[in-house]
Image (tube, rainbow, N blue to C red):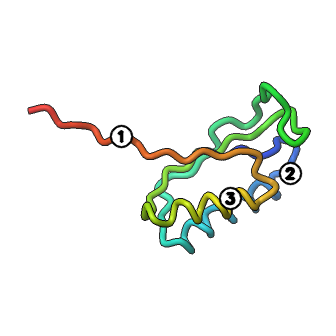
Amino acid sequence: MIFILDARLSDAEKGEVSKQVTDLLVKLEGKVLNSTIWIERQRIAFPINKAPEGTYYLLNIEMKGAEVARFRRELQINERILRFLIIKPEEQKVKV
């Protein structure tokens, strides 16, 4: 999962939003395997909600497939999250 916050937010506000995302995930019986700030400040190709730059967070998560739709809805409600993307990695085939 990747989500983008306005880079103009304070570190405390960014930390609060990040905590909200992880708390929501735990509430939906998911797990955060790894959480990092992927890119601290990156100019966005086009402003999103008048934000010219974003901070990108990368989270490796595990959750039940049935809860993903609910997780997406909750993320869309949060106005401080500019964009997010949740993908399921492809399983790698073992060659013998």
* CA–CA distance in space, label 3 to label 1: 23 Å
**Secondary structure type for disc 2:** loop
Return the disc, 1 or 2, that comes first in the chain's sequence: 2
**Residue lying furthest left:** 96
Task: Give me the residue at 81% from left, 56% from top.
Answer: 79
* CA–CA distance in space, label 1 to label 2: 36 Å
Tell me the amino acid under the disc marked 1: Glu
Task: Give me the residue at 78% from left, 38% from top.
Answer: 54
Task: Give me the residue at 82% from left, 34% from top.
Answer: 53
* CA–CA distance in space, label 3 to label 2: 20 Å
Position of 23 compared to 61: left or right? right
Return the disc, 3 or 2, that comes first in the chain's sequence: 2
Which corner quadrant holds the C terminus? top left
Q: Quadrant of residue 45?
A: top right
Quickly name the residue at label 2: 10
Give the label, 3 or 2, closer to the camera: 3
Tell me the amino acid under the disc marked 2: Ser
Quickly name the residue at label 1: 90
Q: Position of residue 27 (x, y in %)?
A: 57, 74
Q: Nearer the viewer, residue 85 or 15?
A: 85
Quickly name the residue at label 3: 75
